[in-house]
């Protein structure tokens, strides 16, 4: 380590901090494992083992041409867990797109070694607006993401991260430096992975995966999330997962792991302590 090789030969960058019960952190699009640093540090200080990795195509990991579907991404998560020995008594926590890896792992790998799960600002169970998912995101809006990235990915993400962190005309919950950091991290991702993953998280239906959640599950979402609408995702996931604990952050944006970092870290540690 810090690299592990997946079953299809892709090298993934892994950060492994602390010792104790493993908590595997799966990052959002288009960031990297570094987006979990505040929580990983707190977890390690509290006696947990925090494991975070760069998704294939992002950060410091390889950028293969294929493998950006959720079956493969869930297999990558399984490979990280096996390589680090975190496939026993582990808690999986997925932010945004990362919630999809957690959900698909639970069903595809029969929740092997998992004793708890967290879905944070997650795209689970279904982002796309359909006749039976009326609170989802319209297809034309999802298509506009790809169009904007193809036209000028750097300009697209400069605007995207303002919405991501809830930056308005008058006030901002984050500094310009955080916006600059997020934009710089997005530049490390390959164009193919960015586009392919956007298609995957926008169009993958995880509703059938939710029955596989047979462990304590924390669902945490901001009510002002403009990237991943809470009604189609967080609230629906909590209704569909038996015994799930739903925590809503009133007025919080998508990137609440940063904007509400202290509160989120405390809630996560409280959940892990149960």
Image: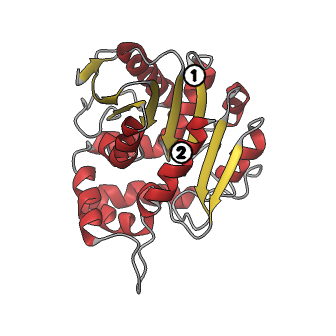
Return the mark for residue 114.
1
Q: Can you say whether 195 is above or below 60 in the image?
A: below
Residue 8 appears in the picture as rendered? yes
Q: Position of residue 106 (x, y in %)?
A: 60, 24
Quadrant including the N terminus: top left
Scheme of colours in the image = secondary structure
Q: Position of residue 53 (x, y in %)?
A: 34, 32
User: Residue at 51% across / 43% down in the picture?
Assistant: 201
User: Residue at 78% across / 35% down in the picture?
Assistant: 242
Name the element at disc 2. helix
For marks 1 and 2, give the CA distance: 16 Å
Q: Earlier in the sequence, mark 1 or mark 2?
A: 1
Quadrant including the C terminus: top right
Q: Can you say whether 198 is above or below 10 in the image?
A: below
Instruction: Report which quarter residue 39 is drawn in.
Output: top left
Instruction: Report which quarter residue 214 is drawn in.
Output: top right
Return the mark for residue 133.
none
Q: Which residue is mark 2?
A: 268
- Using residue 110 as the reference point, say whether residue 159 is left or right of it: left
Residue 127 appears in the picture as rendered? no
- Using residue 96 as the reference point, say whether residue 131 is left or right of it: right
Camera-side residue: 68 or 252? 252
């Amino acid at each position: 380590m810090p690299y592990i090789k997946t079953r299809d030969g892709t090298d993934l960058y892994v950060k492994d901090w602390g010792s104790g019960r493993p908590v595997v952190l799966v990052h959002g699009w288009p960031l990297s494992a570094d987006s979990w640093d505040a929580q990983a540090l707190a977890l390690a200080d509290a006696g947990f083992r925090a494991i975070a990795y760069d998704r294939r195509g992002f950060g410091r990991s390889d950028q293969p041409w294929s493998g950006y579907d959720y079956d493969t991404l869930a297999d990558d998560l399984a490979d990280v867990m096996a390589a680090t020995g975190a496939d026993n008594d582990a808690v999986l926590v997925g932010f945004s797109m990362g919630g999809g890896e957690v959900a698909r792992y639970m069903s595809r790998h029969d929740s092997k070694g998992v004793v708890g799960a967290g879905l944070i600002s997650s795209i689970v169970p279904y982002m796309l607006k359909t006749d039976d998912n009326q609170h989802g995101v319209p297809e034309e809006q999802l298509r506009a993401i790809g169009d904007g990235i193809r036209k000028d990915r750097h300009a697209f993400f400069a605007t995207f991260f303002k919405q991501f962190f809830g930056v308005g005309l008058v006030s901002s919950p984050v500094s310009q430096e955080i916006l600059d950091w997020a934009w710089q991290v997005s530049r490390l991702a390959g164009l193919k992975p960015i586009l392919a993953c956007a298609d995957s998280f926008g169009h993958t239906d995880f509703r059938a995966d939710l029955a596989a959640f047979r462990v304590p599950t924390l669902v945490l979402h901001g009510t002002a999330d403009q990237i991943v609408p809470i009604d189609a995702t967080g609230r629906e996931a909590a209704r569909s997962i038996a015994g799930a604990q739903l925590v809503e952050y009133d007025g919080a944006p998508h990137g609440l792991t940063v904007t509400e970092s202290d509160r989120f870290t405390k809630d996560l540690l409280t959940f892990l302590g149960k």
